[in-house]
Amino acid sequence: MKEKSIEILKTLTETPGVSGFEKTFRKVMENYLADLSSEIKTDRLGSLVAIKEGSTLHPKIMLASHMDEVGFMVTQITDKGFIKFQSLGGWWDQVLLGQRVEILTSRGRVTGVIGAKSPHILTREELQQPVKIKSMFIDVGSTSREETEKMGISPGDPVIPYSPFTVCGNSKTVMAKALDDRAGCSLVVETFQQIKSYDHSNTVYGVMTVQEEVGLRGATTSVEVVKPDLAIVVDVTVATDTPGIGDNDVATKTYLGKGPVIGLYDASMIPHIPFRDFVLKTATENNIPYQVEVMSRGGTDAGKIHIFRQGVPSIVIGIPVRYIHSHVGLAHLDDYHGALELILNLIKTINEDTLKQLQTQL
Ligand SMILES: [Zn+2]
């Protein structure tokens, strides 16, 4: 089970797909899901919807994760051949300097580095201050605009972090780019692989949304395709177990290896309380260790899905990941497998009666 998960996670995190440029990644997901679904479709922005019918159509469970990773887009090439860029999704300036990136041009990948001044030439003032993204540039080793253009680079090209997938020394933690939210996409794949042989009294819609990182856009459009009765959003969350994060710095602490994180609150959603309690009870009854979280800032696709039409009871199941929105995130396989087990148990249990009960308990 571990080896299989590692293989899928490696493939999915290393496949490029920044916000708005998810096509290559979507094809990979389609390959995984084609034989496991009765139907696969896309919405008009490119979100992927894979349907696995159970014994009844309802409840329709939307199992959503987002396909896009944070990255950049080429904006201009300077006279000297350097590349200016726009960030896609949230980046902190300090994690960028000196990092390798890959520009996906119409003629293939070009490797570059986000250039940083050498310490020898920094002024005393510059040494004290972080560099702003807007003054950064990508260096592809060229000395003129013409040379850069000859590489096939042009404005509008997507740029991804360069970061090979690595299994850590404990064999349980992995480091990779794009775990946000390829860990979620990987869980959708593994869920579909498992429920292929299940008897379940609902229909599962595996939805891989586009453009989450730039404003939950694919969730807004794909929910129209599904019209779900319930939603389980699988995304990563910030692990806050690293040095320098005190108990008072965050509302709740989350740790690598202590289980999946169930969202009690984020800036985009307060979950449907009976459904939240149903999920917590399912975890407890199946002896799945879990953590809970309150996130004062930030949100997930559930923020859009739960307010679709008359409302969709929704929950966020998170995988704690250290250093998200940087070149290297770290995730623990125990958390990943705990989330998988929880999702599978929910699909096994949820039927039309569950739905009715949740509504009367509201
Ligand atoms: Zn995410």
Image (cartoon, rainbow, N blue to C red):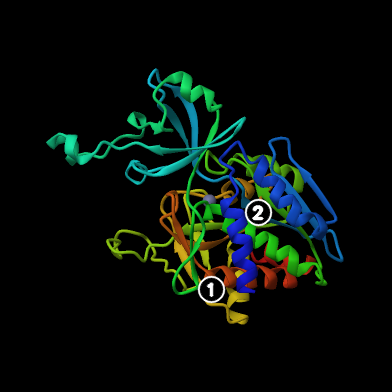
Q: Secondary structure at mark 2?
A: strand
Query: Between disc 1 and disc 2, whose residue precedes?
Result: 2
Residue type (three-letter) at the residue carrying disc 1: Asp
Residue at (44% x, 69% y) in the render: 256
Residue located beneath label 1 in the image:
334
Residue at (43% x, 56% y) in the render: 295
Residue located beneath label 2 in the image:
64
Q: Nearer the viewer, mark 1 or mark 2?
A: 1
Q: Is residue 282 left or right of residue 140?
A: right
Residue at (53% x, 43% y) in the render: 213
Q: Is residue 155 above or below residue 53?
A: above
> Is there any visible trace of residue 267 in the rendered image?
yes
Q: Residue 107 — which label?
A: none
- Looking at this view, is 45 or 307 the one in front? 45
> Is there any visible trace of residue 233 in the rendered image?
no
Q: Is residue 245 left or right of residue 19?
A: left
Q: Is residue 28 left or right of residue 53?
A: left
Q: Position of residue 282 (x, y in %)?
A: 63, 75
Name the quarter where the N terminus is drawn. bottom right
Q: Are marks 1 and 2 in contact (CB under 8 Å)?
A: no
Q: Is residue 49 left or right of residue 187?
A: right
Rounded to the nearest angstrom, the CA distance separating label 1 from label 2 is 21 Å
